[in-house]
Structures are given as C-alpha cells and as structure tokens.
Image: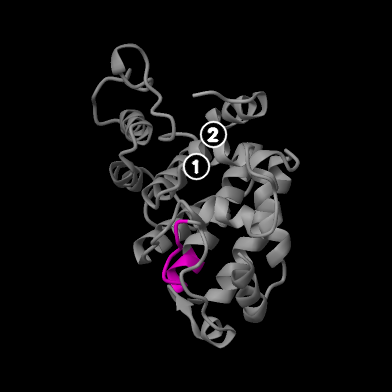
Amino acid sequence: MRFNLRTVVWIGFLLSTGLFLGGAEGQGCGGKSVFESMADDGSDEAQLEKARIALDEGEFADAVEILADLCGTDYSAPSCDPEVVSLYASAFSGRAGLDVFDLIQEAADRPVAPGSSYTLFSTHFSDPDSVDVGDMNKAVLLLLSLSARTPGQGLQLAVATVVDLVVLLGSETGGYGADGRPVSIPTAAELDLSVIEGVSLISRVLRDVNNMDTGLDEAGIGNENISGHIREIQEQLAGADSTAVESFLNTI
C-alpha cells in the first residue's frame, strides 16, 4: 500500500490520538500487539492496557465494556482522565463502524466538493441503525465533556460529529447506496417531527455542525485531507433548518 507525503503526515498525527487505534492493526514482530506489555492484573492501569489492546485489535465492544468500568456511563461527565475519555470515544466510534485509517487514505485522493465530501463518509455507513446512532452520540458526548481539548482531541471531535451526522441522517433515509447517496429523502416536515433519543433530529444536526467547526478550529490544521471535507459539510449545513437539510440531502 502506498501513501503520499501528506497522508503519511496525517497518519503520524493521528497516531498520537485515540482516533487511530484499531484502524491499522498496530502489530509488532510476531503478530503481537504493540500494547501487549503489561502484566495481567486487576489494576486500573492493567485494565486500561487491555482496553488499548482491544482497540488496537478492533475489538470495540470489549473496549467499551472495559472502559465503562473505568469511566462510568454518564457520558457527559465521565470519571476518568481526558486521555482515557478519548479512548472511550474511539471505542464507541469504532463499534459504530468508523475507520479513520481508511477515510484519510480516501480523502487524500478525493477533491473537496459539495456532495463528494459527504459521500466520502456515507459510503462507509450504508445501513446505520439505532445502535450506531446511540454509539456515535455517546462518542460525541464524551468528547464534549472535556473542558479543554488538545488539538488531537479537537480533530477527534470534528470527525466524530461529522460521522454522527452521517449516521443520524442515514437512519432517516433508509441508509445509503453504494455511491453514498441517500436511499430516500424525508421531507422537511418529516425531519421536523423526527425525535432521536429524546432530542429533535434538527437540534442534533445543528449540534454536530457547530462542533465540527469547533473541533477543526481546536485542531488548527487548516483544510488538508479529511479536515477539508469536514469543513465543506459544515459550511453547507451551518445554521440549517429542516428545509435546508432536505435540500442538502437532495444535492448529494
């Protein structure tokens, strides 16, 4: 597999965040995970190491279970350190199907453009269900719980919110076709009536759009690679109401 220089730089950046865990099957010599070094005991440190190994190996459900013991299930006020919160968010995102490694490879070769930027993401989530919608919401809530995010966590927030948007809208459109286009387009009236997990769909769309902007600003990485595609989607939906969302879906 070959990468251009910009993609390599992005991979290096993501390796420093919880975003990347699970995407590249980070294994060393002999097929052992790079994280398999800590003794198997019951300490929090050992549990955290187990969670890292699970993320590295793509065992996201196991990672969620382990991290729930460390962080609790109040996703707006987790009881663990910010670094662990990032891992917890990554576990939920991974369980919903997010693979940042694939996305940054595709983003490097795809021009930023209306419709095209959205399908970069939607082709990865052909049939999102209520579990995926719930998992992505938990990931976003966890990242929003951080009072001060690092640039890596800012990027993680931007990616999580755009994926939450894609999964959320996909659950209303009957999923996406192989080209990433919505299977069906709900009317503005139908979108207005839609309530997801006790919150109106449009309110959650606006939350995601606002936090895409926040996360990208915190990351401070301009519009390179995946961030340019996120910015395109954010600008198209900034301040959107149900009519604008319906129109947006029709342009994909």
Q: Residue at x 34, y 46 (%)?
A: 64
* Residue occupying the far front of the picture: 179
- Between 219 and 159, which is closer to the camera in this rendering? 159
Q: Quadrant of the C terminus?
A: bottom right
6 vs 157, left or right, is: right
Is residue 145 in view from this perspective?
no
181 vs 54, left or right, is: right
Q: Earlier in the sequence, mark 2 or mark 1?
A: 2
- Decide: is 242 above or below 49: below
- Between 180 and 65, which is closer to the camera in this rendering? 180
Q: Quadrant of residue 74?
A: bottom left
Q: Position of residue 228 (x, y in %)?
A: 70, 46
Q: Which residues are magenta?
A: 168-178
Q: Amino acid at mark 1?
A: Ser
Q: Position of residue 24 (x, y in %)?
A: 43, 30
**Residue that mark 1 sits on:** 86
Asked which secondary structure carries label 2, the reply is loop
Q: Position of residue 209 (x, y in %)?
A: 65, 62
Q: Quadrant of residue 41?
A: top left
Q: Position of residue 197 (x, y in %)?
A: 43, 73
- Decide: is 238 above or below 149: below
Is residue 71 in view from this perspective?
yes
Q: Residue at x 37, y 22 (%)?
A: 35
Q: Within the magenta stretch, is there residue 176?
A: yes
Q: Within the magenta stretch, is there residue 11?
A: no
- Decide: is 219 above or below 125: above
Image disc number at residue 17: 2
Asked which secondary structure carries label 1, the reply is helix
